[in-house]
Image (tube, coloured by chain):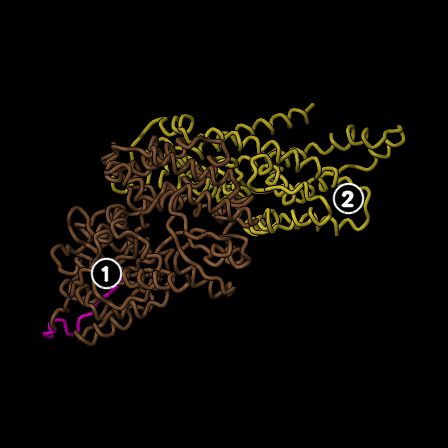
Amino acid sequence: MKRIATLVICIALALSLFCVSASAENVVIEAVPNEGQFAGEELSILVSTGWMDNRYDPTIERFEETYDVSVDLQVIPADQYQDILQSNLANGTCPDIFWIQSNPFAIGTQIVNPEEYCIDFTGEAWQAIMPEARQTSCVYDGKLYGLQLWHNSPEYVMVYNKTLFDELGIEAVPTTYEELKAVCATIAEAGITPWFVPGADGWQHQLAFFQIGGVYEETNPGLYEALNNNTATFAGNEKMLEVLGQFKELSDLGYFGEDWIGTDSTNMVNEYADRNIAFAMANSSYIKQLQEEAATGDEYGMFLIPLGDNDWFPTNPAGPTMFGFKGTEHEDLVRAFFQFVCTPESLQEILDNSPNYTNLDVNVEIDQHWLPEEEEFMATVNPDKMGVSVLQTGTKYTNDYWMQFGQDLIAYCQGTIEANDVLANMDQNRADGASVVGDPNWQ
Amino acid sequence: MNKRKIYPQWFLLLPLILYVVFFLFPSLLGVFYSFTDWGRNTAREGLHFVGLQNYIDIFTSNKNYAAGILNTLKFTLISNVVKIIPALFIAILLYEGLKKTGIYRTIFYLPSIIPFVIIGILFRSIFNFNNGLLNAALEGIGLGAFKQKWLSDLGVVWKSIYGVDAWRGIGYVMTIFLAGLSAIDKTYYEAARVDGAGFWQRLWHVTLPMMRGAIMINLVFGITYGLKVFDIIYVLTNGGPGHATEVMTTYTFQLYSSGQYGLSTAFNTLLLLLTAVVGVLIVRTMSRNEEV
C-alpha cells in the first residue's frame, strides 16, 4: 500500500513539475549590448529595507562591470521610506530608480501621478516575464511603469500536521466545508484543537475570508470589477455570507479552541510541537520554521482553505516593485538596468541569493528551489484556479480596512452584530477610503 | 493691592505665548478642521467646508460611534469609583493605622510609573486563558471554576480593564489623598473623639469635609483622564473583542490612521467639549460647596 502511495506521489510530483515547466512561457530577455554608451555614468536606486536585501548584489556588480558604470544604492529604513519617497518625487530629486510595495491599485494611490513621475516602459519585451496577475501591479491606465520580481510561495494556506492526520486516520485533506467540519470533529474528539486561529493578533483570522477571493469571483463572475467600479457591494453577497456563517459555526463548535479570540500567535510553534493544534493558516516557509524549531519529526503539508468549498489558490500580486523616475538624466541606463535584471542569468542569480525564498514568479525557465511540501501542494492546485487575486488586493480600499473587518468578524462571532453588518461595514469603510482619495466611482 | 504685588505682570507673557501658540491655537485649528473634509487627499484636492457633516456622520454612521461615546462615559464613571473610594480608605489606613507607611506608599505608587505598553504586555500575558498566571493561580488553589476569558469574554472584559486601571491608578490617587490628610489639623479629630465620635462619624464629619480640595483634584484629574482614556484600552484590547471596548479616542485613532482627518478632529472636538463641560461643572459644584 505504501509503495502504491509513494508511486502515486512520485507520478503526481513529476506531473506537477512538468505542468510548472510547461505552463511557463519561457520568455528570454537579452541585455542591452554594451557599446560604451554608458561609461562613467552613475545609477541611483532608492529602496526600502528588505526589498532588495543582498540578493541583487551580484547582479548589480555584473551590471557595473558590464557597462562600466556605478550604482548608488540608497537603502532607507521601512518606517521612513514612504515620507522620503514622496518628498523626493514631489520636489523632483528622486533617484533614477525607486521602489514601492505595489498591488493592483498602489500606482494610483501611492505614486498618485505616474505620468509625471514614472518612465513609461510600455512595449518593453520584459513585461512578458511577469505573470499576468503581477502585471496588474505594474500597469496603470494601460501603460507599463513597473517591474515586479517576487516569489510565489503559497501564502496563508492551511499548514497541517500530516503525521497527526495519519495517526487519527484522516486519509485525505478536506476540500469542502463539510469535509473540513468532519475532519475538525475527528480532531476535536482526540482532545486537540483542530484549527488554531489567533484572534488576539487582530490581523490573522480574517485571512480565512479574504484568501479565498477566487471562489467569490467564480460564484459571481465580474464581482471584482463591479466592486472596483462601485456597482456591487459586499453586503448581500450570498457566497460571502455563507463563508461568514461557516466561520462562525466552526467558532461556535469550539474548533478554533476555547478562547481563540483572546489567543495570539506567539505560542504557535509550541502549539504545533506539542500537538495541541492540528492546522493553522500560514505560509509555506512556516513548515521550514516548524521543522527547525519544533523538531518533533512530524511531517507537515498544506491544503487550501476549504471555506465556501474553495478550490482557488490565493494568488497575491502584491510585492516590492521597481519604477524608473521620469526626471532622471540617465533614462537609457535605467532602461538598460531593467532589461539586465530580466535576463535569465540575472533572475537565477537573484533567486540563488534569496535564502528565504524558494522561487521567483516569472515566465522564464530558471532553476526554482521549491520545497518538497510546496511541490506536493502545488500539484494539488488546478492551474486554472490561480488567475484570481486574493480579495484584499484584488479590490480597491479593502486591504486598508483589514483590522476593522477583523474586529467586525469577531463581533459577529460573539453575536453582537449580524453577518451582513460585517459586510455592510466593509462597504462603508471602502466608501470612506474612496472618498479620502476622491475616487470618481464613489462620487 | 498693587503695592502687594511681588512679580511684574509681564512675567505672564512667555507662558501665555507658549500656551496660545502650542495649545490654544492648535485646539482652535482642530475645531476648524472638524468642519472640513480634511483628509489624506487634501494636498491635491484642496480643503472644503462641509458644515456639520462630520458631526452628523458620528451620530448616524452604522459603525456605532455612539457606543464609543457611551463607553467613554461609562469608563469615566466606573474607573473613578473603583479608584477613588479604595484609594481614600488606603490613604486613611496608611495615615492613621500602619507603621512603616513609606514602604506601603512606595508599593502602591509604583504601578503608576510603569509605562502603559509594559502594563499591556504584562497583563495580556497574565490574563491569557490557557497559559496566563491568573487562571493558573486560580486552578492551583482549587478555584478553577472561576477561570475566565479575561480579555475576550464580553461580560468580563470591562471588569478586567477597570481592574488593571485601578491597579495602576490607585497609588496616584492615594498620594493626593495623603497630602490632603496631612493638611487636616489633628485637633479636629481630638475634639471629635472627646465628643465620642466613632470612625465613620469622624470620616463623614471631619475627614471628608476637610478633604474637599483633594477630592476635587482627584475628581477633575480622574474625569479628564477617563474621558481621554486611550492607552490602557489600546494596550489591553485595542477596542475589542469586536468593538466591545471602543472609546472615543480609539475611534479617533482609527479615523486618523485611515486618512479621515476631518472626522477624526470632529471626534476630538466632541471630546474637548465634553471634558470642558464636565470639568467646569465639577469645579463649580465643589467651589460652591466650599463657599457654603
Q: Residue at x 63, y 47 (%)?
A: B112
Of badges 2 and 1, nearer the viewer stands 1
Chain identifier, brown in the render: A
Which region of the structure is painted magenta? A34-46
Residue A241 drawn at (x, y percent): 38, 34
Subunit of mark 1? A
Q: Given the image, on which type of amino acid does mark 1 rest?
A: Val
Main secondary structure along the magenta-highlighted residues:
loop
Chain identifier, yellow in the render: B
> Which quadrant of the structure image shows residue B287?
top right
Q: Is residue A39 magenta?
A: yes
- Quarter occupied by the C terminus of chain A: top left
Subunit of mark 2? B
Q: Given the image, on which type of amino acid does mark 2 rest?
A: Leu
Q: Residue at x 42, y 41 (%)?
A: A178
Residue A395 drawn at (x, y percent): 29, 42
Q: Is residue A224 above or below residue A130?
A: above
Q: Which residue is mark 2?
A: B94
Question: Is A82 left, or right, of A126 in this rendering?
Answer: right
Residue B277 drawn at (x, y percent): 53, 28
Q: Which residue is mark 1?
A: A362
> Which quadrant of the structure image shows residue B183?
top right
Question: Is A102 left, or right, of A335 in this rendering?
Answer: right
**Disc 2 packing (10 Å; few <14; some 14–19; many ≥20):** some
Q: CA distance from mark 2 to mark 1?
A: 73 Å
Element type at marker 1? loop
**Disc 1 packing (10 Å; few <14; some 14–19; many ≥20):** many
Residue B283 visible, this angle: yes
In terms of depth relative to the viewer, which is nearer, B140 or B17?
Answer: B140
Tags 2 and 1 both on a single chain = no
